[in-house]
Image (cartoon, rainbow, N blue to C red):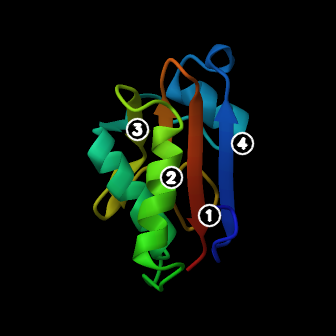
Amino acid sequence: MQDIDVEQVWLTVLQPSEAATYDDVARIAGIEPLGKAWIEISRSEARALLSGLLHRSLPYQAELMPRHRADWLAGEFIDAFGPYGGRFATNGVDRGWTPATDYVMDRGLVVMSEIGSGIFWVADED
């Protein structure tokens, strides 16, 4: 997941006691906390978002990896936090977003569950 051809990738997995909020996960990973700007999404939306981030680049929608591999990796990442439940948040949907880095474009996913928490975030320049 870290080897995709983008400017920067953040991938962090934490134990349950290491983070209590989305902002905690962001801080530990090294991106800006978003406070009230986090957008909570469903598990299926989280999987689709993550698969899209792995499949296509943010600025030009260039293919980064085949769709089937992106879908598989997205499922593995999300399922690592348990098969049910969990909470998921991002910094934007569709074309709008709240920046969490100093890069021109960034988007990602934070997962929180009883098993732990994690973040996958990508950033790119124009």
When the figure is inspected, residue 56 is found, relative to residue 31, above or below; the finding is below
- In primary-sequence order, the first of circles 4 and 3 is 4
- In primary-sequence order, the first of circles 2 and 4 is 4
Instruction: Looking at the picture, tell me which residue is in the foreground, 86 or 106.
Output: 86
- In primary-sequence order, the first of circles 3 and 2 is 3
**If the image is split into quadrants, where does the C terminus sit?**
bottom right
Disc 2 is placed on an element classified as loop
Point out which mark residue 115 bears: none
Q: Which residue is mark 4?
A: 30
In-image side of 15 versus 37 (left or right): right
Q: Position of residue 101 (x, y in %)?
A: 61, 53
- In primary-sequence order, the first of circles 1 and 4 is 4
Point out which mark residue 89 bears: 3
Q: Nearer the viewer, mark 4 or mark 3?
A: 3
Give the amino acid type for the residue marked by disc 1 in the picture. Tyr
Q: Which residue is mark 2?
A: 99
Give the amino acid type for the residue marked by disc 4 in the picture. Gly
Report how far apart the C-alphas of labels 2 and 4 lie in the structure.
Answer: 13 Å
Q: Which residue is mark 1?
A: 103
Give the amino acid type for the residue marked by disc 2 in the picture. Pro
Q: Nearer the viewer, mark 1 or mark 3?
A: 3
Disc 1 is placed on an element classified as loop
Report how far apart the C-alphas of labels 2 and 1 lie in the structure.
Answer: 8 Å
Other-residue count near label 1 (Cα within 10 Å), few / some / many at <14 / 14–19 / ≥20: some
- In primary-sequence order, the first of circles 1 and 3 is 3
Report how far apart the C-alphas of labels 1 and 4 lie in the structure.
Answer: 13 Å
Instruction: Looking at the picture, tell me which residue is in the foreground, 54 or 93.
Output: 54
In-image side of 106 versus 25 (left or right): left
Q: Nearer the viewer, mark 3 or mark 2?
A: 3
